[in-house]
Image (spheres, grey):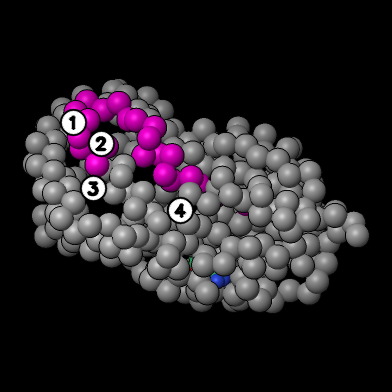
Amino acid sequence: MSNKNVNWSDEKWKEMIIKQRVFLWSEDAIEAYSKWLGLRQGMRVADIGCGLGYLGYTYWKYFGNNGHYIGIDINEDLLKDAKATSPNWAIGGTAEFIQGDVYKIPLPDNSVDMVMCQTLLMHLKNPEHALAEMKRILKPGGILMCKEPDNISGMTSRRDSSSEDRSIEYEVLSFKLTLIAYKGSISLGRGDTSIGIRVPKMLSDLGFKSIDMRANENVHLLLPPYETKKQRYSFEQLKERINKNEETKEKERQFWKERFKEEYLAGGGALEELQQFEKMVEEEREKNEAILKDQVKKRIYHSCGGNLFFIIKGIKNFD
Ligand SMILES: C[S@@+](CC[C@H](N)C(=O)[O-])C[C@H]1O[C@@H](n2cnc3c(N)ncnc32)[C@H](O)[C@@H]1O
């Protein structure tokens, strides 16, 4: 089953797969990965859980000449949008979009040269089943590429920021509660937000060969005077976020707070400790928000850190 708690065409979620994608992978990394993956012009490529077709337009340059892209997603609304924008990028080849479930991919056995997916497995209750389906539709010798994060590692990789100075007590409690909520989220069937590190073994268990893995240089860097395009984009996003009206911000906070609570309790966490943490979060927010606003206004805010986002490949064996 997929994660029924998330409808990716709802504004809140859809915004994520638009805004977070703008500078997700750098151009030079995409070029290097294309070589490493063995992409060739004219390939027939299926993108499962394609959303708005991000992987299609990102890698098109490396397979699209006489190539064939098949975007598959369970969400019809996203597919409509993806289809509408595809003539802008799918030039010199074909792009089609089909509604379908990863657990029953609407494509024949041994029919595509490559299967790709990004941030799909992390939302699934049964990623092994999904990967077995992907293998079924791959031709022997075909390539599978999965891009999935390890979000828990992001908790331990610290961020240097001019507006945050969190106490050790806060950091430790935050990490502990997040680990509990992470376990809870899996038990609720919401998927595994750190699945990236588990994918190679899953591929191996399914009989894939030549399994290999890279990590994205997924850094967050904001350093005045924000010289790169990516930094200017991130700075605008930050401004937009902090300048939202208070009511909207409060609504969003409540949404995430409730979701976290649900997952934390499902993971076996104690309510008292959660309440203690919520109090700390509130105090930190009060302290840091004003500093952040002021620094952003003066354009002196800086922040630097990174998250792990893996790219994993495997080849379907000739039996
Ligand atoms: C986080 S989005 C990623 C979209 C796209 N791959 C990207 O990186 O921009 C997850 C996508 O998986 C799709 N999805 C979730 N469960 C699915 C399922 N069981 N079968 C097919 N697609 C599914 C969602 O509709 C959504 O578009």
Asked whether residue 46 appears in the rendered view, the answer is no
Residue at the location (39% across, 61% down)? 185
Highlighted magenta segment, given as a residue range: 146-173
Query: Quadrant location of the C terminus?
Result: bottom right
* 154 drawn magenta: yes
In the picture of the structure, the residue carrying the numbered disc 4 is 193
Mark 4 or mark 1, which has the lower sequence index? 1
| Residue depth check, mark 1 versus mark 3: number of the one nearer the observer | 1
What's the distance in space between the residues labelled 1 and 2, CA to CA?
6 Å
Disc assigned to residue 171: 2
Provide residue 23's location: percent of width, then percent of height: 46, 41
* Res. 167 mark: 1
Looking at this view, is 242 or 146 the one in front?
146
Label 1 close to label 2 by CB (< 8 Å): yes
Disc 3/disc 2 C-alpha distance (Å): 23 Å
> For residue 247, which quarter of the picture?
bottom left
Q: Which of marks 4 and 1 is in front?
A: 1
Find numbered disc 2 in the image and state the secondary structure of the residue it sits on: helix
Q: How far apart are marks 4 and 2 (CA)?
A: 20 Å
Please, what secondary structure does the residue beneath circle 3 have?
helix
